[in-house]
């Protein structure tokens, strides 16, 4: 059995015995041109992905803006006729609560646009999303049960917490949807 050195020497001798490859004029230039074309194609692909991501963000922003504008035109009148405040302070609070409700509804519409959650989920994003969904449900319960019983500032605080939780939920769900699309 030949040693490793003898085996390496045999391979070297065989390689030297091979005929020399004919060199073509402009061969190196051809190699460089093919490499440049491959890099350009990769750069175009990256640009397409970036444009697609930017377009999806813009679409969500436009939909959210249209939803907020639509709710702002319809809902405040209904809320104003439904609740008649006794003082100016109560009127201001009702206005803030109405604005928070509108923001909350708009965020729910954005979640609808994002769509259902994927069947396969990453634990790193699934746990925070589930936690936020439970938090929103708890806040909804607190708002519905305590609407008549809570102190005036408490209702506004609950709605503000709901909007904050929904904001975080929309962001996480958007990131989750983007990971699935790629």
Image (tube, rainbow, N blue to C red):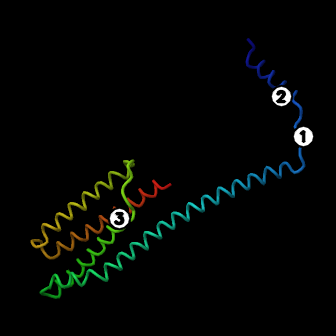
Q: Which residue is depicted at the point 56% across and 65% down?
A: 51
Q: Which of marks 3 and 1 is nearer the N terminus?
A: 1
Q: Residue 71 carries which label?
A: none
- Residue 122: give x, y in percent of width and height: 39, 48
On screen, 112 above or below 80? above
Q: Gap between marks 2 and 3, in whole Å?
A: 66 Å
Q: Earlier in the sequence, mark 1 or mark 2?
A: 2
Q: Mark 2 points at which residue?
A: 15
User: Is residue 79 left or right of 42 when viewed as pictured?
Assistant: left
- Residue 170: give x, y in percent of width and height: 36, 63
Q: Which residue is depicted at the point 36% across and 75% down?
A: 67
Q: Which mark is residue 112?
A: 3
Label 1 Cα neighbours within 10 Å, binned few <14 / some 14-19 / many ≥20: few
- Residue 179: give x, y in percent of width and height: 46, 54
Q: Name the residue under label 1.
A: 22
Residues tagged 2 and 3 counted as in contact (Cβ below 8 A): no
Under tag 3, what secondary structure? helix
Under tag 1, what secondary structure? loop
On screen, 93 above or below 165? below
Quarter of the figure with the N terminus: top right
Of tags 2 and 3, which is closer to the observer? Answer: 3
Q: Gap between marks 1 and 2, in whole Å?
A: 16 Å
On screen, 154 above or below 121? below
Q: Which of marks 2 and 3 is nearer the N terminus?
A: 2
Of tags 1 and 2, which is closer to the observer? Answer: 1
Q: Which residue is depicted at the point 73% across and 19% down?
A: 4
């Amino acid at each position: 059995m030949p040693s490793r050195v003898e085996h390496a020497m045999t391979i070297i001798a065989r390689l030297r015995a091979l005929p020399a490859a004919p060199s073509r004029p402009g061969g190196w230039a051809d190699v460089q041109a093919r490499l440049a074309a491959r890099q350009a194609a990769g750069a175009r692909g990256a640009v397409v992905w970036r444009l697609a991501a930017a377009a999806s963000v813009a679409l969500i922003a436009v939909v959210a803006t249209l939803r907020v504008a639509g709710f702002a035109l319809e809902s405040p009148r209904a809320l104003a006729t439904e609740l008649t405040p006794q003082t100016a302070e109560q009127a201001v609070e009702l206005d803030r609560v109405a604005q928070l409700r509108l923001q909350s509804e708009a965020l729910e519409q954005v979640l609808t646009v994002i769509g259902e959650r994927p069947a396969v989920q990453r634990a790193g994003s699934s746990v925070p999303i589930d936690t936020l969904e439970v938090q929103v449900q708890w806040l909804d319960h607190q708002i519905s049960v305590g609407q008549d019983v809570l102190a005036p500032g408490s209702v506004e605080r609950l709605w503000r917490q709901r909007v904050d939780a929904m904001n975080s939920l929309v962001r996480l769900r958007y990131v989750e949807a983007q990971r699935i699309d790629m």
